[in-house]
Image (cartoon, rainbow, N blue to C red):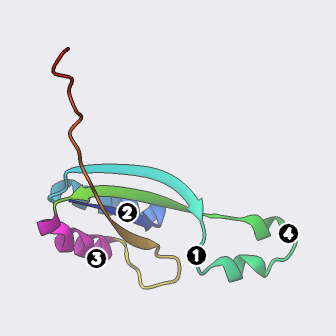
Amino acid sequence: MKQVVAIVKPHLAEGLVEALLRAPVEALTVREVRGYGRQKDYLNQYGETEYALAFLPKLEIEVWVDDSRLEEVVQLIQEKASTGRLGDGKILILPVTTFKPVTDAKA
């Protein structure tokens, strides 16, 4: 199983979440986040103004997906959230290790 984390522009998130709800994912989480990537240089050009510390609004969408469906889900995210412009965000794929808690047989 893998965890896929997609950082996307807020106006694209609703369509992406709707598509993911129909996709073969095990679970889904959405969080509001702020940050910057390559736009950092753009923000720094304002020098000492209030914009120098500005972070751009994004949404972080996490899904957990079976290994066999990983490519399908990543492709869906790219189709729904990519504009081809600066600031589209990132897709991260992380391994997931699950475990069963040890039960005390004496209890």
62 left or right of 102? right
In the image, which is nearer the foreground, mark 1 or mark 4?
Answer: 1
Q: Which residue is mark 3?
A: 79
Quote the CA–CA distance across marks 1 and 4: 19 Å
Q: Position of residue 81 (x, y in %)?
A: 36, 72
In terms of secondary structure, where does tag 2 sit? strand
Q: Which mark is residue 5?
A: 2
Name, please, the residue furthest toward the left.
68
Name, please, the residue furthest toward the top.
107
In terms of secondary structure, where does tag 1 sit? loop
Q: Is residue 10 magenta?
A: no
* Point 65% across, 64% down: residue: 55
Nearer to the camera, 99 or 23: 99
Quote the CA–CA distance across marks 1 and 2: 15 Å
In the image, which is nearer the foreground, mark 3 or mark 2?
Answer: 2
In terms of secondary structure, where does tag 3 sit? helix
Badge 2 or badge 4: first in the primary sequence:
2
In terms of secondary structure, where does tag 4 sit? loop
Q: What residue type is disc 1 on?
A: Gly
Q: What residue type is disc 2 on?
A: Val
Quarter of the figure that contains the N terminus = bottom left
Q: Are marks 4 and 3 in contact (CB under 8 Å)?
A: no
**Which of the 4 quarters of the picture holds residue 23?**
bottom left
Above-or-below relation of 66 to 93: above
Q: Residues within 10 Å of mark 2 (few under 14, many from 20)?
A: many
Q: Which residue is mark 4?
A: 49
Quote the CA–CA distance across marks 4 and 3: 36 Å
Nearer to the camera, 61 or 17: 61
Which residues fall within the magenta stretch?
67-80
Badge 3 or badge 2: first in the primary sequence:
2
Badge 1 or badge 3: first in the primary sequence:
1
